[in-house]
Each structure stands twice: as structure tokens, then as C-alpha cells.
Image (tube, rainbow, N blue to C red):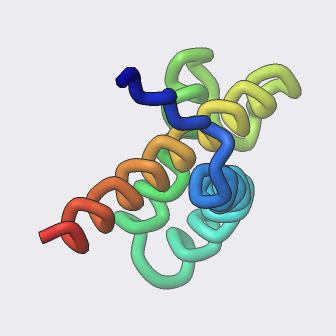
Amino acid sequence: MARKPNSLLTLGNIITLVIGIVAGIVLPVIGLFVGLQFSPVLGTVLVAPYIGVAALFDTYVGNMSGFARLLGLALSIVTYVVLAFGVRHLFRLALRR
């Protein structure tokens, strides 16, 4: 008998997607403050998608145009969604053993 394919819209996938989107919006802002006050390396890692877009447009993060900021936000969201799904997959693999 053929197996029915699983749906991609499961509760776990939706929750992981929402966590990744929220992290993509919030963590770069936190990274700016952490980088200035606590740890420059951690701040740089958290703001890395914006730094990549700023390097692509050959400008500073503070001088980016509106399009570049939106592109940085989109790249940040995609980055943190991929990281959230990766962490979820690693947890599922660890719990399976």
C-alpha cells in the first residue's frame, strides 16, 4: 500500500516558522545593543544578515536605503527560519536515540 504524504502545515512546522520569523525581526535589534554594550562578537553574529547586505551595497548599516533595509530584514528572517528548522531537526534526531 502506498503511503500518504505528510502535510507540511503541521503544528510543529508552523510554530517553528513563527519562532524563526520573530527571531529574524528581534535578534538583529538586540544584536545592535549587545554589540555596543556587552560583546561585539555576539552582536556582529546577530546582525550578520544586515552586515552582509550593507557589504553588498557598499555602505554602512546606518546609511542603508529603505530597499536595503527591507532586503536585510528579509535575509534576516530567512536566515533565522532556516536556523530554527535546523535546531528543531537536531532536537528531533537527539530525542529519537
Give percent across and percent down for residue 54. Answer: 59, 28
Quadrant (top left/top right/bottom left/bottom right) for the N terminus: top left
Give percent across and percent down for residue 41. Answer: 35, 64
Front-lying residue, 48 or 26: 26
Q: Spot the residue most to the front.
A: 1
Position of residue 22 relative to residue 48, above or below, is below
Q: Count every numbered label the image shows and give the total.
A: 0
Give percent across and percent down for residue 24. Answer: 65, 52
Asked whether, in this view, residue 20 is left or right of residue 6, the answer is right
Front-lying residue, 84 or 38: 84
Asked whether, in this view, residue 42 is left or right of residue 43, the answer is left
Q: Which residue is drawn at 64% across and 50% down?
A: 10
Q: Spot the residue most to the left.
A: 97
When asked about the image quadrant of residue 97, the answer is bottom left
Q: Which residue is drawn at 51% across and 40% down?
A: 79
Asked whether, in this view, residue 24 is left or right of residue 64, the answer is left
Position of residue 17 relative to residue 33, above or below, is above
Q: Which residue is drawn at 60% across and 36% down?
A: 7
Front-lying residue, 15 or 75: 15
Position of residue 70 relative to residue 49, above or below, is above
Front-lying residue, 57 or 17: 17
Asked whether residue 28 appears in the rendered view, the answer is no
Q: Which residue is drawn at 37% across and 59% down?
A: 87
Q: Spot the residue most to the bottom.
A: 38
Asked whether residue 71 appears in the rendered view, the answer is yes
When asked about the image quadrant of residue 8, the answer is top right
Q: Spot the residue most to the right.
A: 66
Give percent across and percent down for residue 76. Answer: 61, 41
Position of residue 92 relative to residue 8, above or below, is below
